[in-house]
Image (cartoon, grey):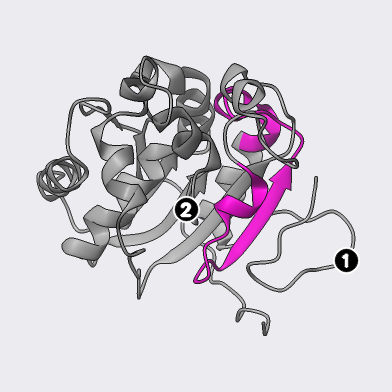
Amino acid sequence: MTPAPAAVPAPAGEETVVLVHGLWMHPVVFALLRRRLTRACFTVPAWTYPSVRGRLIANADALTAFLAALPGAAPLHLVGHSLGGIVIANALARHPDPRVRRIVLMGPPWAASHCAAALLRVPCVSALVGRSMRDWMDMTRPELPGTEVGVIAGNRPIGLAGTLVGLPRPHDGIVRVAETRVAAARDAVTLHVSHMEMLFSSRCAEQVTAFLRRGAFVHHGAAKPAGQGIAA
């Protein structure tokens, strides 16, 4: 893969960053990340949706409506954790918004979900996977032309779900690093955090801010082509 062209830094103080939580979550989980992004001069609303009972397309369309209601023509950025990133991708694929410039997907089960597939085979546990995740497992992966995508994966294997299903390493306790790979991503990085630690990690917040500002993560050591993340 050839390196991405140099990104133009985004001006401070003018952009909105919409946060989208994952399965079984609530916007309150973004309290620390929201505070850090606000200090970085972003306006940071958090959007919520029925992550368990809602169908994926319905949730994606609801996000589209939320974005359409945001005032102004200033650049928008989106940050999604886990299933939240999947909802973002489907919303933009179905209804592109020219204001959306960059998105960060944190621990997205993009390529597949070993964990979800295993849980679906357990009758008393399958409902935990939720309707949106079930829909995603059978869908063609969307393309996101015109949007710069950054992907953060975790490799700290702490999580009950991953332990129950014997998730192959490296993984973040729920999602395997290999499952986070998005072919069209501009950049990717792997951090030593678990799936839930991404929400509270200062290192993760720094990487999110870096990508939103300049379209690239902070890689320690040699520069890497876009899409080839390294541990940090």
Rendering quarter of residue 173? top right
Residue under numbered circle 1: 222
Q: Is residue 4 left or right of residue 218?
A: left
What residue is shown at x 40% (from left), y 45% (from top)? Answer: 85
Q: Position of residue 183 (x, y in %)?
A: 53, 70
Residue placed under numbered mark 2 in the picture = 110
Estimate the x, y position of residue 95 in percent, counting from the top left: 16, 62
Q: Quadrant of residue 129?
A: top left
The residue nearer to you, when weighing 143 against 160, is 160
Circle 1 packing at 10 Å, graded few (<14), some (14-19), many (20+), is few
Q: Residue furthest bottom?
A: 2
Secondary structure beneath dot 1 equals: loop
- Drawn side of residue 158 relative to residue 137, left or right: right
**Element under disc 2:** loop
> Which residue is rendered at x = 73% and y = 29% of the image?
157
Mark 1: amino acid: Ala
